[in-house]
Image: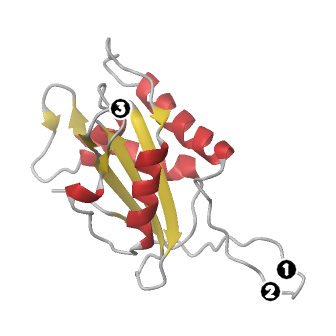
Amino acid sequence: MVKIETRKRRKKVTEPATEQGQAQEKIVDTRIKAVQDEIVRCHNDIRRNVNPTASDMKKMVWNEDAAQNARKVASMCSDRHSPPNKRIIKKPNVITCGENLYMSSSEDPWRDRIDDWASEVKVFRYGHGPISKGAITGHYTQVVSANTTLVGCGSQRCNNLKFPYLTVCHYCP
């Protein structure tokens, strides 16, 4: 069972008014290197602080193929997980990636999105899994899986969704 995050917030993020006097809603573009670096940094901060400490935890790095797939999935504006064949990267080998979705009513900072997935640690125990029946921990385990080394994300405003700010991250392998 996979939880889809649906936080209700009224805050609206806008950019300064354009020359025509209209405010433009801000979507953080994951094609920008600084955004990619922030996403990777957030993931690695969480991974570095797992408890118990992981002896084999690898650093996560940005993967543009995974990001392109995540952007395509986000552009579909669906609140459902994509099929595995939409999450395949072919470099260095053919790999099917995992996926986290995050939806909210406002465009949250990347740190907040990733920290929200990581907050599932409260209902997770290493070596056991979820601490109670029905507890959702899949987002957290995607973020901290020691073998996962590649991440790529995309974000899209989807007016057809109840929570229109959609974030998709793909985790490989």
Residue at x 77%, y 81% (from the top left corner): 23
Q: Which quarter of the rendered picture does the C terminus lie within?
A: top left
Residue furthest toward the right?
19
- Going from the N terminus, do you reach mark 1 or mark 3 first? 1
Q: CA distance from mark 2 to mark 1?
A: 5 Å
Residue at x 73%, y 78% (from the top left corner): 24
- Quick check: marks 1 and 3 in contact, CB under 8 Å? no
| Residue identifier under label 1 | 18
Q: Which quarter of the rendered picture does the N terminus lie within?
A: bottom left
* Crowd rating for badge 1 (residues with CA inside 10 Å; few <14, some 14–19, many 20+): few
The x, y position of residue 76, in whole percent, is 39, 74
Q: Is residue 83 above or below residue 89?
A: below
Residue at x 21%, y 27% (from the top left corner): 126
Frontmost residue, 3 versus 57: 57
| Residue identifier under label 2 | 22
Q: What element does badge 2 sit on? A: loop
In the rendered structure, find residue 108 and report the number of the disc placed on it.
none
| Residue identifier under label 3 | 92
Name the image quarter holding residue 96: top left
Q: What element does badge 1 sit on? A: loop
Q: What element does badge 3 sit on? A: loop
Going by the numbered disc 3, the residue's amino acid type is: Pro
Frontmost residue, 17 versus 133: 17
Q: Is residue 20 above or below residue 26?
A: below
- Quick check: marks 2 and 1 in contact, CB under 8 Å? yes
